[in-house]
Image (cartoon, grey):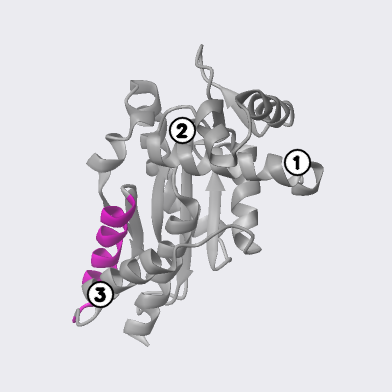
Amino acid sequence: MIRSGEMTERQKAILFAVIEQYAEIAVPVGSVMLAKLFNVSSATVRAEMARLEELGLLTTLHTSSGRVPTDAGYRLYVNALADGSTRQDEEDFSRATHALTSRVEGQGRADTAIQQAAETLAELTGNLGLATIDGRLYMAGLGTLFAQPEFVAAERTQAVARLLDNIEPWLREAEPNEPVNIYIGQENPIGRSSEASLIISRFRSPFSDKTYIGVLGPTRQSYSRVIYLVQAAGKTLEQQFF
């Protein structure tokens, strides 16, 4: 695995910028856009992006001159989120948390509250919202997930469908135990060919101490926001129940 210490600070900043830009525009990121952002020449950016490609953190799609992140690039970025070295949008996080809380609070039934949280996650992230409720899997936003450009091709859709078919039994068997569990692309223990990321949080509910809520989406997404929202959903539900 590539470590951030193997890159210069500028290379790391360029990698993170590519990841964040690609999440927004869904097309490969070119040197001209980044040159303006970093106030350097396009040639300088191209050289740095070439080095990041050598390290396996960026790649080129087809004949495009732009780059996109690899699973390894995303993993390095997500690890940086954990140590606080990437920027956070506190105002956006506050609005999103309020949306989650307002949808969950006051629900008389635990299953309804969990469904509302999963549906809110789907709406806020554009991903598939999912949760386990009393031993079954609840999903919201399937149409939104398959509207993402990554899943237009039939083989990608089929790969995601196979992943969804196996999530519930896998959760029961594996019982992921971290506050937030993040599986990026090939890291997925199931559906490795789906090019999807699974982000789930474990929380206590009236049904079980091992209830899960989270999202499934393309590897291209705003990880800082999505990870925060998934964790906030789990915490909000626990506060509602206990």
Q: Position of residue 97 (x, y in %)?
A: 34, 71
Task: Name which residue type carries label 3.
Answer: Val
**What secondary structure prevails in the magenta region?**
helix
Q: Position of residue 18 (x, y in %)?
A: 54, 37
Nearest to the observer: residue 27 or residue 179 = 27
- The crowd level at tag 1 (other Cα within 10 Å; few <14, some 14-19, many 20+) is few
Residue at label 3? 104
When the figure is inspected, residue 53 is found, relative to residue 183, above or below; the finding is above
Q: Is residue 236 left or right of 119 when viewed as pictured?
A: right
Residue at label 1? 2
Q: Is residue 71 left or right of 89 when viewed as pictured?
A: right
Given the current orientation, which residue lies at the most extreme right position?
A: 6
Q: Earlier in the sequence, mark 2 or mark 3?
A: 3
Q: Earlier in the sequence, mark 1 or mark 2?
A: 1
Q: Which residues are magenta?
A: 108-125
Task: Name which residue type carries label 2.
Answer: Ser
Q: CA distance from mark 2 to mark 3?
A: 31 Å
When the figure is inspected, residue 193 is found, relative to residue 213, above or below; the finding is above
Task: Assign the N terminus to one quadrant of the image.
Answer: top right
Task: Assign the C terminus to one quadrant of the image.
Answer: bottom left
Residue 194's tag is 2
Q: Which residue is pictured at 25% across the width and 64% down the height?
A: 115
Q: Position of residue 213 (x, y in %)?
A: 39, 62
Nearest to the observer: residue 31 or residue 57 = 31
